[in-house]
């Protein structure tokens, strides 16, 4: 989505947000804030109810999720694919409440978080290196960013919302989590912060066509794979470190884990395809840890090589 308008400064309140056309937005915001103060067992119950509702109503997203899981996990039976696809919707809705808790009730996470591999970030920062944290579009949303912020100060790449009021709200809420929010179109800003030694969460796991990438295997299937991070790393002299966070155990009493892997040697290399394949393989390994905590309702394979059928028919 594009920036709502050049006249809007991210995070700034404008009196025009009080106009009647925004009143429904304000009611939604108030409702979300009220939901955020509820105990987890009630939030969890509401999340599962909403997930079942979305599963029944969002036919296209449901079909896309089932198709993606069939392609990526051919070892699963039809019954497993169906059950796991439905769980994706449940994890997505749980992620909404986890994000609300991160924004409005962060103390809820106290005692629920553990981390592995923090030394990889600390060592890179001691060397004065910027860090591109290669992550995924997890259903945990900003809750993942919050739990990371308990151990280091991450920046984030974001896409502005079309609705300027919602953009202001999300920007302000995220400002309590991330040190800096960088527009996905602001390549100069990205490079500047990497050169300054910042750690930036960047997710190269969606299909933006071949103008921004190349075809590379993802779970054995050709997928349009973003390669912009190669240029960022090369220009800024930053390092790439894989980052993954996920909910662990029973969602009645969830725990959250952060996994930080060693920096990727020789990234970027001289071979664009090898680099894209390497990053996709890392993402595959991460997603196998908690498969349903990924946004499988996006069309990851919408760009197809010549001669390949459309898998989303």
Image (cartoon, rainbow, N blue to C red):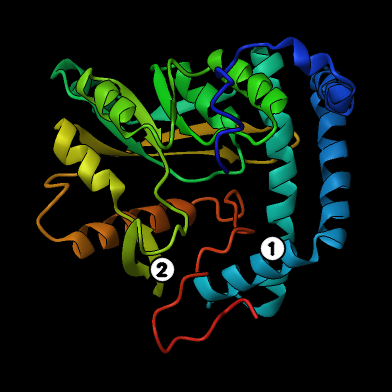
Residue furthest to the bottom: 307
Q: Is residue 221 left or right of residue 261?
A: right
Identify the element where label 1 is drawn. Answer: helix
Q: Residue at x 28, y 44 (%)?
A: 229
Q: Is residue 174 above or below residue 116?
A: above
Residue 12 in view, yes or no: yes
Image quadrant where residue 185 sits: top left
In the image, 189 versus 39, the foreground residue is: 189
Which quarter shows the C terminus? Answer: bottom right
What's the mark number on residue 240?
Answer: none
Image quadrant where residue 77 sits: bottom right
Q: Is residue 116 left or right of residue 18?
A: left
Q: Is residue 186 left or right of residue 70?
A: left
Q: Residue at x 34, y 53 (%)?
A: 282
Q: Is residue 136 above or below residue 171?
A: below
Q: Position of residue 97 (x, y in %)?
A: 74, 31
Residue 28 in view, yes or no: no
Number of the front mark, 1 or 2? 2
Q: Residue beneath label 2, please?
A: 223
Which quarter shows the N terminus? Answer: top right
Image quadrant where residue 87 sits: bottom right
In the image, 139 versus 301, the foreground residue is: 301
Query: How many numbered marks appear?
Result: 2
Q: Residue beneath label 1, please?
A: 85
């Amino acid at each position: 989505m594009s920036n709502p308008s050049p006249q809007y400064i991210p995070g700034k309140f404008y009196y025009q947000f009080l106009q009647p056309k925004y009143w429904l937005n304000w009611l939604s915001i108030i409702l979300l804030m009220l939901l955020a103060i509820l105990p987890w067992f009630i939030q969890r119950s509401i999340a599962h109810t909403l997930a079942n509702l979305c599963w029944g109503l969002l036919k296209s997203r449901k079909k896309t999720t089932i198709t993606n899981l069939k392609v990526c996990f051919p070892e699963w039976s039809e019954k497993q694919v169906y059950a796991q696809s439905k769980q994706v919707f449940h994890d997505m809705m749980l992620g909404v409440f986890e994000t609300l808790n991160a924004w409005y009730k962060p103390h809820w996470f106290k005692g629920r978080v553990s981390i592995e591999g923090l030394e990889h970030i600390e060592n890179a920062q001691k060397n004065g290196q910027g860090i591109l944290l290669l992550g995924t579009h997890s259903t945990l949303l900003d809750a993942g960013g919050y739990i990371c912020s308990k151990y280091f100060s991450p920046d984030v790449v974001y896409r502005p919302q079309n609705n300027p009021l919602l953009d202001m709200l999300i920007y302000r809420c995220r400002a309590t989590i991330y040190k800096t929010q960088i527009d996905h179109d602001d390549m100069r800003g990205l490079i500047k912060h990497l050169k300054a030694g910042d750690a930036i969460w960047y997710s190269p796991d969606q299909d933006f066509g071949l103008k921004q990438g190349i075809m590379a295997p993802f779970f054995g299937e050709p997928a349009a794979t973003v390669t912009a991070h190669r240029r960022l790393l090369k220009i800024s002299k930053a390092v790439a470190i894989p980052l993954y966070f996920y909910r662990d155990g029973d969602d009645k009493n969830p725990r959250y884990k952060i996994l930080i892997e060693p920096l990727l040697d020789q990234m970027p290399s001289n071979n664009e395809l090898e680099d894209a394949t390497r990053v996709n393989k890392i993402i595959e390994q991460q997603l196998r840890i908690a498969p349903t905590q990924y946004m499988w309702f996006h069309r990851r394979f919408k760009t197809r090589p010549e001669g390949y059928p459309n898998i989303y028919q």
